[in-house]
Amino acid sequence: MKTTSMHDPDCVFCKISAGEIPAHKVYEDESFLAFLDINPRGVGHVQVIPKKHVRWVWDVENAGEYFEVVKKIALAQQKAFNTEMIRSQIFGDEIPHAHIWVWPNDPSTSLGASKMDFEENAEKIRKSI
């Protein structure tokens, strides 16, 4: 069943999108937001979400545009962390808001950076977009 409201007051991703919860944003446009995951799987682990509250990725109205944003983030991560391999995952059970994880896989890509250095990693990705 589709859930498509502009904002769900109980949704953590809606709160991030609305600026109610701070996040290390790497990309934002009218429809989508990309920010660093607070429990990263690796350096530069990003969550890409639609700003409009949608429960499942498959229900995002402009899914092609959504995946273009994910691609933009992945290409920026390749450049920022000097790697070819970027992982992505669509899971969706931990937060009830559509989201796609994107992160560099190769540990040698960190170039000495800590996966917990959110400000530095966000800046590297922003500069690479």
Image (tube, rainbow, N blue to C red):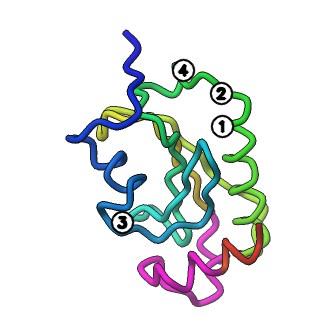
N-term mark: 3 or 1: 3
Separation of residues labelled 3 and 4 (CA atoms): 24 Å
The residue tagged 4 is 58
- Amino acid type at mark 3: Ile
Left or right: where 119 falls relative to 3: right
Q: Is residue 60 magenta?
A: no
| Residue 72 drawn above or below residue 83 | above
Q: Is residue 122 magenta?
A: yes
Hey, which residue is sitting farthest left in the picture? 10
The residues colored magenta run 104-123
**Which of the labelled discs sits on residue 38, or is there none?**
3
Element type at marker 4?
helix
The residue tagged 1 is 66
| Disc 4 packing (10 Å; few <14; some 14–19; many ≥20) | few
- Amino acid type at mark 1: Tyr
Q: Nearer the viewer, mark 3 or mark 1?
A: 1
- Amino acid type at mark 2: Ala
